[in-house]
Amino acid sequence: MATRPTFSEEVANLMHSSHGNPLNTCIQCGTCSGTCPVAEFMDHTPRCLIGLINANQKEDVLDSNTYWFCASCFHCTVRCPSEIDISGLMYSLKRYSIWKHHYSDDAIGPVFSETFVKSILRSGRSYEPVLAPSYIFSYGVREFLNEAHTATNLMLKGRIPVIPPKLKRIENFKKMADRIIPMGGAK
Amino acid sequence: MDTKKKLLMIDDDPDFVEPIMAILENAGYEVDAKYNPDEGFQALKTGSYDLLLLDVLMGRGAEGIMIARKIGDDEKLRETPILIITGMREQIAFLFPGQPVHPSFVPTDELIEKPVEPDLLLEKVSTLLKMAEERKAKSELN
Amino acid sequence: MSTYSYFPGCSLEKMALSYHQSAMQTTNAVGVEMKEIEDWNCCGATTYFHVDELLAYTLVARNLAMAEKAGHDLVAPCSACYKNTYFTSKYLKEDKDLSDHINYALEQDNLKYSGSIEVKHLMEVFVNDVGLEEIKERTTKPLAGLRVAPYYGCQIVRPKKDHEDVENPRFFEELVSSIGADPVDFAYRLRCCGGSLIITSREAALTLVRNLLQNAVDSDADVIATACPLCQTNLEVYQMQVNQEFDTNFSIPIMYFTQLMGIAMGLPKKKLGIGSEFISTDKILTYAKEPA
Ligand code: SF4
Ligand code: SF4
């Protein structure tokens, strides 16, 4: 009867509706890593991460910062000779890690996603200033000042709104979200 | 139990499926598990199951809800009782404060949250099975 | 006059207001009407897909349904919005199960998306629907001698939609030529600007921005033209931070392609939102001259 899925099968299940080929068609050619503009900042290159998944190295994969560094630029995806949707994989891993709360405390990505999603569910539109507190405290002092400086300049140039935008039919909008995720409302 | 009741479990998390299957099998049920929504729905359509245990967050997102809705739209399948078992509150409550709301798609269903107490699980399963049977008996009478 | 349902996206409300203004002016100048979708919502940027793709599709589908109701194809000026909307529409057309479910949610706002419209990036409207000949025709002050680095970025070309050339697109260069300017050979034109990494992984994003700026400067560009508010923000607003971080000295203007089109069409600079940028575009404006 049901045999326990391996980690690579778990990832395949996560990507069951992927528009690319399964990860086990990866030929480890390294095109993705060579293409990826942020590879040098990643714990593992995309090629390496896929190798680890195929070898069921679950902990190494989940602990890796690789998928949070992915900028969703789709450059690897359009070049992969095996037509694997590598960007889609990175999205899936982000999702998996959020659902399982499996990410390091200093990762900004998950917090940013949460804040962003919350802000949209509240008002229907994104509003830059509410995003700021979610990440700015994780910066060092110098980055913080830089960022504050940039924000002030943007404000002076009239490029940051003062009042958060909101939908007219926000109640319908929330009810709509409730039908997809029935959690008693995004209030 | 004379004939073994057949249950299907659709849940992407092997760490959850294993113990739950053990509990149910110990209690005399026959249990199949599918780990993704597509295979799960396929199995439900082709096999004949007495009850479905359904996870919510799988694959792209809240696909369990999508399956339940689809079952509700299907004349025949909608008679299968569904026990939705979700860890949503754990998984994404930071986004959606509040409790999982029970979306009733089929005549006989219920929602409980992970982690699940074995006794509660067995109680819910047998209650749902009984309710479905009564419903069936009634409709056959008419 | 052809009419489109226009979906500005969150950035264009304020951060990239100049893109919005110049888009309105230039489309109007070529006889195209952009009707803003009423009560549109955020497309989820790239972030929603981290949490629940189905919810992301739902948000996008709401905009699509409103555009469909209005009876026009949907146009997005932001590349991220465009990509999300294009692919959501495609997936909903291909997958009945998915579209049934999303439409079940849309019922709550009395909407339905049946997949009868197309999704286009603003630049596609100019290049394919209006046509380069027409744009040439409307160009009263060609930008002769202006060296423009056409920055495609990511999502206007990727992921691949059909059989188009994703490795060597030429439409942006052709558009630049049609307003009399010179497209430079810009090797990094398809490289990522870092997108929202600027928030989540600052160092990585600033490095990408630096590399792009360096490459544009090396190719002797006077200005980088963009077709996306995220790219514009990363390249312009963070240019100063790059200078501080890497001890560089960049000062290259970053303009929306619609602003360049606008000045070539002789439209007033204020109406094109010129003046809200950090890096002066004065020099660029001097190129707009009536041909001798
Ligand atoms: S480009 Fe494709 S085949 Fe090559 S290593 Fe990357 S994922 Fe594997
Ligand atoms: S999509 Fe992600 S992994 Fe692929 S090249 Fe871009 S940043 Fe790298």
Image (tube, coloured by chain):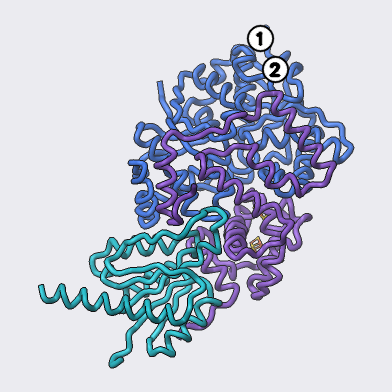
Chain colours: A purple, B cyan, C blue
Pointer 2 or 1: first along the chain: 2
Q: Residue visible at 38% across and 69% down?
A: B41
Give the Cα separation between the discs numbered 2 and 1.
9 Å
Q: Residue visible at 69% across and 61% down?
A: A46
Left/right placement of residue A179 relative to residue C138 reads left
Labelled disc at residue C291: 1
Q: Residue visible at 29% across and 65% down?
A: B106
Q: Residue visible at 72% across and 59% down?
A: A105
**As drawn, B22 above or below C240:** below
User: Where in the figure is residue B86, as x and y percent of width and height?
Assistant: 47, 67
Q: Are marks 2 and 1 on the same chain?
A: yes
Secondary structure beneath label 1? loop
State the image quarter where residue C116 is shown: top left
- Dot 1, crowdedness within 10 Å: few (<14), some or many (≥20)? few
Task: Name the amino acid, label 2.
Answer: Ala
User: Where in the figure is residue C17, as x and y percent of width and height?
Assistant: 60, 26
Q: Badges 2 and 1: C-beta atoms under 8 Å apart?
A: yes
- Dot 2, crowdedness within 10 Å: few (<14), some or many (≥20)? some
Tell me the chain of label 2: C
Tell me the chain of label 1: C
Q: Which residue is mark 2?
A: C144
Give the quadrant of the N terminus of chain A: bottom left
